[in-house]
Amino acid sequence: MNIEQWGRISKQSGFSLISLMIASLIGVIITGAAIQMYLGSSQTFQARQAVSAAGENNRFALDDIARTIVMTGRGMSGDNDNNYKRAHGKQQSVWGAGNVDGGINGSDEIVFMLALGKNCTGGDIVDESNNNNWEDVNGDGNKTLIGIVTSIRYYIAIDGNNISNLMCQVGGDTPEPLVAGIEMIKVLYGLDTDFDNAANYYVTSTKLTELGNANPSEPDPWNSIVSIRIGIISSSAEFNIPDSRQLPGSPATINVLGGSYTPADNGRAYHASTATVSLRNLGFQ
């Protein structure tokens, strides 16, 4: 084999510049598509996370308040020594003087009274070593452990990060945040006017007080509450919906139990719900 033949055999052809440019372009397209899919999936996840957070915050707040409503009045009797006496000697399990309409964001405040059970921070209200005693509350010979009457107050407060929190205050203790992202609480009180332990209609605390003032010779309407209707508007708090997933236009006004709330254009998801809870311990009021 001569030198000329060897040169022809060992000669190899490489990629042309055009081929390299086409391959690079295909690679860029594939990479861009992969990045777009990742961003889309990430934004979808963030949007779902925000919607889920708004719903969970709502459920947690509603469950906590409902749990207190169920226990309201438990363990109370006319012999408890405190400042919440009714005119006829017994105590008010839903304390009229502590319930306020139209606070922060138009939210209501509500105060419950009870002497047995758990408070909103998980503490045990009963302390048998602290002046609790056993009494025949119903006059049937069966004694019930009577605890120290405690107030539980729910209201809304905005923290330093501009997030609305459901607050709980037990007696005179320092208020504690329970659930973040609770924008509004509205409360209606079920008034029993025919004494069948069923609400005939629902009114605000302001209306209840007006009814009492207008008819001072009649029984206090606060003593005739048999159920409470709670409405809550919640947000996703620190979780936001990405801009690309938000609907165009201004956020719509959310209405619940006569209250209106217009969300700020802050990318948060919102959720509204209501629940009606009966007062189970009317015999102790």
Image (cartoon, helix red, strand yellow):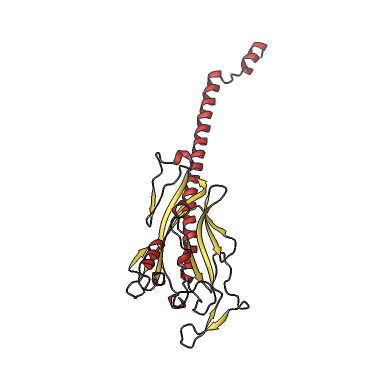
Which residue sits furthest bottom?
Answer: 141
Q: Position of residue 272 (x, y in %)?
A: 42, 54
Answer above or below: position of 7 versus 60.
above
State the image coordinates of residue 188 (x, y, percent, origin top left).
39, 62
> In the picture provided, is 1 more to the left or to the right than 276?
right
Please indicate whether residue 152 sits to the left or right of residue 196 in the image: right
Q: Nearer the viewer, residue 23 or 101?
A: 101
Q: Residue 118's x, y, as percent?
A: 55, 70
Please tell me whether residue 85 is drawn above or below residue 209 in the rendered image: below
Instruction: Answer with the quarter of the image where residue 277 lies.
Output: bottom left
Q: Residue at x 53, y 49 (%)?
A: 163
Tell me what residue is drawn at x 49 percent, y 67 percent: 112
Instruction: Name the residue rendered at 40%, 65% in the picture.
Output: 209
Q: Residue at x 32, y 68 (%)?
A: 200
Judged left or right of residue 256, residue 91 is right
Q: In the figure, residue 175 lies in which quadrant?
A: bottom right
